[in-house]
Amino acid sequence: MRGGLWQLGQSITRRLAQGDKKAVARRYFASDAELKKTVVYDFHVANGGKMVPFAGWSMPIQYKDSIMDSTLNCRENGSLFDVSHMCGLSLKGKDSVPFLEKLVIADVAGLAPGTGSLTVFTNEKGGAIDDSVITKVKDDHIYLVVNAGCRDKDLAHIEEHMKAFKAKGGDVSWHIHDERSLLALQIFGCCVIAHSFAPTSCYLFSHDLVMVLLLLRFLQHLTKADLSKMYFGGFQVLDINGVQCFLTRTGYTGEDGFEISIPSESAVDLAKAILEKSEGKIRLTGLGARDSLRLEAGLCLYGNDLEQHITPIEAGLTWAIGKRRRAEGGFLGADVILKQLEEGPKIRRVGFFSSGPPPRSHSEIQDEGGNNIGEVTSGGFSPCLKKNIAIGYVKSGLHKAGTKVKIIIRGKSNEGVVTKMPFVPTKYYKPS
Amino acid sequence: MACRQLWASRAASYLRISVFHRSFSNVLNDLKYADSHEWVKVDGNSATVGITDHAQDHLGEVVYVELPEVGATVTQGEGFGAAESVKATSDINSPVSGKVVEVNEKLTSSPALVNTSPYKDGWIIKVEMSDSGELNNLMDSEKYSKFCEEEDSNH
């Protein structure tokens, strides 16, 4: 690591995995109450980042742009996020697919190499331990990213099950990519370029079109890969400017874009290059805006909308359970989940619009007669829609769009209505 | 994926942390200030109340202001309303005790006035004071400026 990028601090070493022989060095800093720092930390501060504690890390919640403006700009032009606090890891071995299928609800075997999907790690009661994007690199290599706040329990969970699996002769090992950093680049209109020979699909102003084209060319120039053939959920290991990166076409904002896993020593240089090439259109964007974006996209926030006691069925993630797995099960908590599939869950995650103050987590939801029917799990003011939006759980039967509800905020009742999600349409790049 | 976090409550306090310092927030000389960042302008027995420039700067763009009813009783140091930004909720405490005689209804449709004009168009309530002696519990502009500097540097 470059000395200039790391402040002085204590170095603590601990072994995170039986399969990973080398110790992983982790730096902790006496200042900021022992918060960890990404390699991009100094770059954030130099660019006006407001750093706040987040899942044990010091992360930028916003920069000079307001959260409102950052959210709007992501959807209009694009954003660059540092998501290095999230934990990337690889599972390798000829049995890595059956191993992972014991732990997640996805049809991993059915994924084509070079593609991925959102999935859920379940506990024995079918509740969500974490959500994760998993990618099949090859049949014997899976790359996945888990949430920063769930890292310790996820790794302990995987390690425990890996021990048992290997004891029975299974061939699987893992590597935790702590030597890498993760940047999320979300770009509006990226998909338009790939079809730019169809004039009717170009709805950008010419200047913006040139900007986006330059940026896409920038990425393609660096990678020599054909990104127009890389669809949402796609994955490639490739060189960007001579550095080996893992590129996943994904994001957690509803926009098109890429998550780029890059060796940490090159992360700041890449961030600078992306920002410079975009001539100010792509803006550094903090976690505050990222949360607004994922809320507008109707996506779950683990710890709010997903918890250990909430199943994927209740969370509206039935689509993430592969067809074969609905028939076969084979993952932790399958009996509970498949029963809910058959009988229907008792509660369901839904979206809301409301008047009055923005709803926040734990606001009570009542029916029009004043009876408790659920709770808000995420909510706020939508910068794009200019109105209140929320995600929450209500009793089954009261989950239809158009159902009128009351949302109780600081003791007062406010009008609300159930609505389908996403609140803001997604723009994933998919084959037409 | 997203991370475990209670945005509303934690973001509210974190957003009050300023890693970098503005040259200075605007502070007017003829007002009195509370340590919870409200201002009060006194005219006889009438007091006009709002949040300070420092407060709106930390809160971010305000999208909703919860207003009390005319006739409500307010107590010095206690909450009478709230200001909501995209990510955070902040109680608004009254710097004086008394009865609300007027509320700024413009804030219902234009809450961002609190950001753009915190000391004028963004005023929140007018109070008929029950005890003007309470004003001695508040800070003048010089003390308040110092208070803000100390608060910012403590993070």
Image: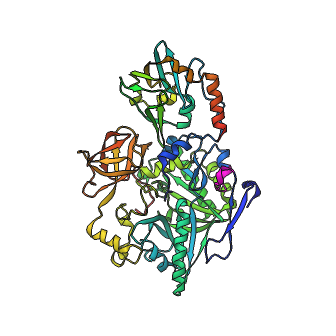
Residue positioned 35% across, 27% down in the render: B69
**Residue A35 belongs to magenta span:** yes
Across and down, in percent, residue B34 comes to 55, 27
Can you give x and y, in whole percent of width and height, for residue B14 in the image? Answer: 56, 44
- Dividing the picture into quadrants, the one containing residue A359 is top left
Residue at image x 24%, y 57%?
A: A397
Where is the N terminus of chain A found, in terms of image quarters? Answer: bottom right
Please identify the quadrant where the C terminus of chain A is shown: bottom left
Is residue A180 placed above or below A198 in the rendered structure?
A: below
Residue placed furthest toward the bottom: A169
- Residue A269 shows in the view: yes
- Compared with A261, A388 (above or below) is above
What scheme was used to colour the molecule?
A: rainbow
Camera-side residue of B1 and B129 = B129
Spot the residue most to the left: A369
What percent of the width, then of the height, locates residue A176?
Answer: 61, 69
Viewer-nearest residue: A294 or A283: A294
Image coordinates of residue A330 in percent, x first then y, are 40, 78
Q: Is residue A19 magenta?
A: no
Asked if residue A242 is positioned above or below residue A161 in the image, the reply reads above
Above or below A389: residue A197: below
Does the image show residue A114?
A: no
Number of residue marks = 0
**Residue at the extreme top of the image, as rendered:** B44
- The magenta stretch is A31-42
